[in-house]
Amino acid sequence: MEHRDQRKYIHQYKNYNIESRYKTKKADSVKYQNRQEKIVKKHFGFKHLEELSDKESSDIVFVICNQSNGFVDLFKQNKDPDWLFLLMKITAKICKTDFLVSKQLILTEICWNSVFIDHLKSYILTTPTEKNKNRQSNLEEFFDNCLTVCQSITDLFLKTATESLSSLIICLRMALSDIKNNCINIKINDTILLDKITKILNRFENLNSNTVMKKDNTNILQNETPPEDFRVLSIYPTPFDMKYQRPFLRPNIIKGAYQSVEHYLDVQFRLLREDFISPLRDGIKCYIENNKNCHEGRKRINNIRIYRDIQFNKEKVFVQDKLGYLINFNKNKKLKINWDISKRLMYGSLLLFTVNEFDDFFIGIVLGRDKRYLENGQLIIELISDIHPDMLTSSFTMAESEVYFEPYKCAMQVLQNLNANNFPMEKYIISACNKIENPSYLKSLPVKMFKINDEIPFNVLNDSDWPKQEKLGLDEMQYKAFKAALTNELTVIQGPPGTGKTFIGLKIIKTIIQNLYQKKELKNPIIVVCNTNHALDQFMEGIIKFTKNVVRIGGQTKSNIVKGYTLKNATKNYRKSFDVFKTIRSATEIIENIEHEITHLKKCKEFITQNAGILELSLLKNGMPI
């Protein structure tokens, strides 16, 4: 973890701040407050500090881990020089311990404590005029301890050390120079100290130059012209992708604006495509190398699963209105897999078929994952490539990508269909504008009055009109998130598990429905997107409690409550007009007729290939010359 993320983690570790993880549970919060009241921080006295400084580093660690003894608070106080000497001696000992978390705890307190660093710098600059004989004799050890601490911070948090400690290191160098040139009474061997200073400053300088170079290289890359329009690239991997290791890529811009919508789409599409193809390429490469070096030690093949002796069945199957091919992938039943829990051959998984070590291949997608077929070593797939049926008579090697393809496929298709005319939130995503406007639907309302929890109606865009957080039953952070979501057209709400994100999301939707949809102010639907089917089911179960006008897209629900709200059930229950009903019935009949015709022709083909009987003359008329 690096600087700010590390700081946040250590800060939470230090304070045992479980309240922030369970804000929505009031009982837990009360228990936490009661515990905090019982923890009375003691005063860490100078005598205690002296005794601690003489202990071994492992013993010191156990003392500082006790949050109630007040040791860490010493860094927040402007103490006399004698205290500074002891604090740096103890901290330098901690830096030599193997207890990483304890080391991070104390170094984080120093690194982000500008008051302590400023206080330390002030004293260091006065050391050439130090009059105290005891401190004079210990200055070399003090400087060495300071540099040991700075070196440890640099090792753990290089970027933060560069920002926070550069001036401190320079102060140390200035003080040493001044003592050497002007102080007869202070004896210091500065050779080793100056060498440490030089090494630390060199690391700072290298980081800064690399950052500038990286920034320059990034700018050069961003201005390069792509070799082709990303929309002509296949979303599926090609044999060329497996052989060519360096596709045209530009880094994601994490700070600042993109040049245009096209620039953003091109960067994101190529990165997303390579994110999927790169592990697939590595897996194929490892498989080929293992086959070449079959007499030497074989490497473990990662990212792909290999299935050999794959046979295409003559039988074809209709699945969800798509024509699927039945393949035999486990003919001898050697694979012993519990298909109820296995992640192999999931619906939408990408498959590569080859007869020549993946010099060429064609692509299939898992179309059906029927357990009955799988237990018999069979699988239903959809062929993406246009393959002549005669080519399917061979025995193939099949590679399954362990990286699940379906979400990549959907995202890449969306990116290829976007352009400057239909790109949403361009102002924020492309131009990096940080001034968030009110939602457009609120601006157009003549009366912007909302009512929440049966409170008195208030103007949602007037900050002073809002009810207090206590009346809404929210804590401070939940209140801010709730308010932002209702008054901004773009809001990001994040937090660790248990902080009430789902609770707030449901409250936001309920408020919008009650104040805008039930009053007929809005008609277009709200779209809720979740990372997992389970998360979506949970969220929908919450929504159903206050509105039944909801539809779940996708058939992967496992919730009995949500099953009645799937798109399939919604279309069944929808009251269709006569014209709509007639059109659907007609289309259904056409599909059924085509399926019957395909089934009939398949049987005829089997008759021909097996010489099993005489065909009707009418079947041949389409192929006969007039």
Image (spheres, rainbow, N blue to C red):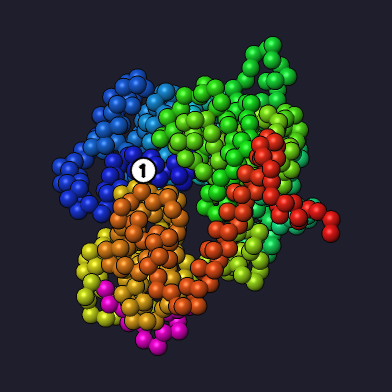
Looking at the picture, how far across and down is residue 442, in whole percent?
42, 79
Let me know if residue 480 is in the magenta part: no
The residue at the point 40 percent across, 65 percent down is 572
Tell which of 625 and 370 is nearer to you. Answer: 625
Image quarter of the C terminus: bottom right
Residue for badge 1:
11
Looking at the picture, how far across and down is residue 146, in whole percent?
47, 32
The residue at the point 41 percent across, 84 percent down is 445
Question: Which amino acid, by three-letter code, is at mark 1?
Answer: His
- Residue neighbourhood size for the residue with mark 1, other residues' Cα within 10 Å, grouped as few (<14), some (14–19), many (≥20): some
**Farthest bottom residue?**
446
Image-quadrant location for residue 8: top left
In the figure, 138 relative to 360: above or below?
Answer: above
Looking at the picture, how far across and down is residue 419, in whole percent?
66, 66
In the figure, 422 relative to 618: above or below?
Answer: below
Can I make out residue 301 in this image?
yes
Tell which of 89 and 483 is nearer to you. Answer: 483
Name the chief secondary structure element in magenta: loop
Taking the image as shown, residue 477 lies to the left or right of residue 176, namely: left
Let me know if residue 439 is in the magenta part: yes
Q: Which residues are magenta?
A: 438-452
Taking the image as shown, residue 511 lies to the left or right of residue 324, namely: left
Taking the image as shown, residue 396 lies to the left or right of residue 112, namely: right
